[in-house]
Image (cartoon, helix red, strand yellow):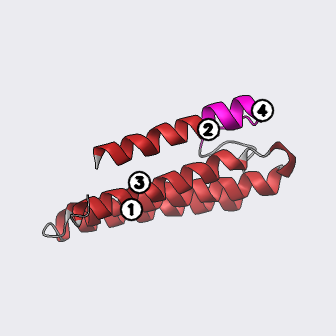
Amino acid sequence: MFNYLLIVMLTYLFISEIYLKRKLGIKSRNRWLFHEDRYKVAIVIDVLLLIAFIFLSVEFMIERPHYPMIVKASPTFIMVTLQFINQGVEEYLQDRSSKAHYHDWLGAFMMALTFCIFYLGEQGYF
């Protein structure tokens, strides 16, 4: 399983840093949660995702400790993936020509792929 995670990490770094940034010249925009240039709807969605993450994490860690570890870790993967998608859609709506949303969507895809690797590893496929 470690080998697959290493391949995903190296693939992400190659695509993001070498291909998108250096070859295509697409810079990523990292914005804080409450940055003044962000849409208010996107901020509300991010805050709701954070609140849902906190409640789901508490639910799985305290109320349901007998669940497998991948189920307990799933709120983290879900929150990060949905935040990447939300920020990618926001970047797409704000400035399509900069193509900065490619970085966010790549991050969402890689987080979903990482979750799949962890899930398959927990099920004994790796």
Circle 2 is placed at which residue position?
16
Identify residue type, mark 4. Answer: Gly
Q: Which mark is residue 25?
A: 4
Q: Which residue is drawn at 71% across and 49% down?
A: 101
* Residue ID for mark 3: 114
Question: Was residue 25 drawn as part of the magenta stretch in this picture?
Answer: yes
Residue 55, given in percent of the width and then of the height, sits at 35, 65
Give x and y (percent) for residue 66: 12, 69
Please state if 89 lies on the left or on the right of 14 as rendered.
Answer: right
Name the one closer to the observer, 114 or 76. Answer: 114
The amino acid sitting under disc 1 is: Cys
Region rendered in magenta = 16-32
Q: How far apart are marks 4 and 3 (CA)?
A: 26 Å
Q: Do the residues labelled 3 and 2 touch (CB within 8 Å)?
A: no
Percent coordinates x, y for residue 114 in the rendering = 41, 54
Which is more toward the observer, 27 or 21? Answer: 21
Q: In this view, does 13 lie to the left or right of 37?
A: left
Q: Which of marks 4 and 3 is nearer the N terminus?
A: 4
Neighbour tally class for label 3: few under 14, some 14-19, many 20 plus, Cα within 10 Å: some
| Residue at 29% from the left image edge and 44% from the top image edge | 2
Q: Distance between the residues labelled 3 and 2?
A: 16 Å
The answer to whether 115 appears left or right of 10 in the picture is left
Q: Is residue 89 left or right of residue 115?
A: right
- Residue 116 marker: 1
Task: Give yes or no for contact between labels 4 and 3 (Cβ–Cβ under 8 Å).
Answer: no
Residue type marked 3: Thr
Q: Above or below — where is 70 with respect to 20?
A: below
